[in-house]
Structures are given as C-alpha cells and as structure tokens.
Amino acid sequence: MKQSQTPIISFSPVILPVPGRHVDLQMKVSAPASGNNLPVILLSHGHGASNFLSSYRGYGPLVDFFASYGFVVIQPTHQDSKTLTLDPSIPEAPLFWNSRATDMKYILDHLDQIISTVPGLSGRVDKTKVAAIGHSMGGHTVAMLAGMEVTDPAIGKIVNAAEPRLKARVLIGVSGGPEGFNGAARQHYPVLAAGNFSTMTLPALIVNGDKDKNLMFSDVDNWRADAYYQSHGPKDLLTVFGAEHIFGGISGYDARETSDENPERVTFVCESILAYLHSALNQKDGSWEEAKKALNGVASAKGRIDSKL
C-alpha cells in the first residue's frame, strides 16, 4: 500500500495502571520521526478471532499510514483481547464493551503522561487535536464516544460515554441497529442489540463496505451503515465498493482473517479517512469536499460519500 516516505517510530509497551481494571492498560505509540504540532489518533481494535491483531500489536497498515502522514497513533489493548487471556466468566466479558470506552477516556485524561513516556515525542504534539478511529467492535467503542447510548443488558442501566474532547470520530465496519441484528451472534453478544444510534449526535464518519455481510450477525444488506442512517447529523458515510469486513486488510499485513485482500482498497480507505480528518481538525481545510468531488458520480470510483447536517 502507498505510504508517505516520512520515517516513523514506534514505542511499546506504554503501561498505565487503571483503578478497577483487571490488568494494566498496555499501549503502543507510533509517530513520525520528525515534525511538530502533531495531531493524535486513538485507535480502537476489533474483537476478532486472531490472537494478536486485536491488541496494540495489530492494525499495522492503518498505524503505519497515519503515523507517516503526521499523526501520533495510540493503540490500547482492550480487555477483550485474547492476548490477555482473562477469565471469560468475568462480568462484562467477552466484549468488555464499557471498559473499552473507559480506556479511551483514560488515555485522554493521561495524554501528557503517555507522550512524555515516548523518547523524543514531548513538545511535538498538538493535544487539542485528537481523533478516534475504531474498527468493528472498536467502531462500537467510538460510536459510544460519539454519543450512542447503550443499555447494559445485565443491569438495565443506560450508559452514555459521549466524549466532546475528541475533534473527530471514525467508525469502520461498526455493528448496525438492533432490529437488523438477527443472526446467531445476537445470543452471544446481546449488548450489540442494546445501542441507540439516535443519541449519537456528535460528528462522525461511518465507513461501510457494501459487501460486508456476515449471516452470523445479520442478513440485511448494508446493515453496518445503520450508524449513519439512524443517527442525527452531522454525519458522513463512506461506502467502499467491494469491501468486506476487513476492507482489503486493515487489521494486519497479510492477515489470514482478511477475506477480501486488496492493498489498493486499504490505501483508498486510509486516504479517504485522512481527507476526513484533515477537514475535521481544520475547518479551513477542503480535503473532504475534494474527496467527494473525486468519488461521487465518477464511474471508476472506489466508493461514494454521503453527508447530512
């Protein structure tokens, strides 16, 4: 996949003790080797079948791309990661859906400490420009940060984790609305049927693959675009033509879980998100509008962008 020629550095693990967490919070931080005023991305991994892709060790294609284009990328290992081998009988297992959002907020609360831990990064970061990107279960996490309320299936409490400190939010391959969640997975993951997109009022980009259909979850076409259609604006929807759930391979280089391996598609997804972030973090930047012009109504385009205010 195409990347900037800017060298990057990666530092891991950065470890923070978190009160009430079953294990310490482990992270990897990646950044360009040079440059200042660097914006930040918090990247939330999915809940996949792989042992290491769903941890701070995964998502190399995304991390390398955004770090090479001037972002500091912070990757937490959420408690649902198989690398932690936590007891599946723990309350909130296996998804640890609420603690995932708490992880992201804890990182925001301790951003200075994290940055100071990485050699050569202090003084180079613009801490006022922080975005969150999540894939699959990570998309659910970012949806919560965008205001999606979740009713805890265990106790009936409504959880609102809206996070206005974030300046941009990107949901990739996020699970859809409860009415379309009609596969066998609904019995295993009832919390995915407990979200309310109508409360997700903060701006966000939803990235949906038009071939991302898994009968274990839903038989509804484009079910994973519900976050756009069922929420209030401002929202944007990037539909990636031909993409399945891993969007050509965003979760790892040559990952076996990728059913639609396509490096060009990975590049397209990354470049499109980059354009969105540039405009979301700088109101004077026209990259996102240019991306719309390059895609919408163009016969050879790899995707389409819809927007609502």
Image (cartoon, rainbow, N blue to C red):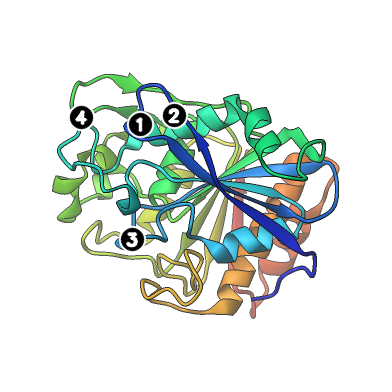
Give me the C-alpha separation between circle 3 and circle 2.
22 Å
Amino acid under disc 2: Thr
Name the foreground residue: 273 vs 122.
122
Give me the C-alpha separation between circle 1 and circle 3.
21 Å
Residue 65 rendering spot, x and y as whole percentages: 67, 63
Residue 268 rendering spot, x and y as whole percentages: 63, 69
- Dot 1 and dot 2 residues touching (CB under 8 Å): yes
Left or right: residue 179 versus residue 34 is left
| Quarter of the image where the C terminus is located | top right
Look at mark 1 in the image and give the residue it sits on.
98
Residue 54 at least partly seen: yes
Say few, some or many: other residues with alpha carbon within 10 Å of mark 4 (under 14 / 14 to 19 / 20 or more).
some
The tag earlier along the polypeptide, 4 or 2, is: 2
| Quarter of the image where the N terminus is located | bottom right
Helix, strand or loop for disc 1: helix
Look at mark 2 in the image and give the residue it sits on.
102
Q: Which residue is at a point 23% across and 39% down the rendered structure image?
A: 93
Amino acid under disc 3: Asn
Left or right: residue 87 versus residue 5 is left
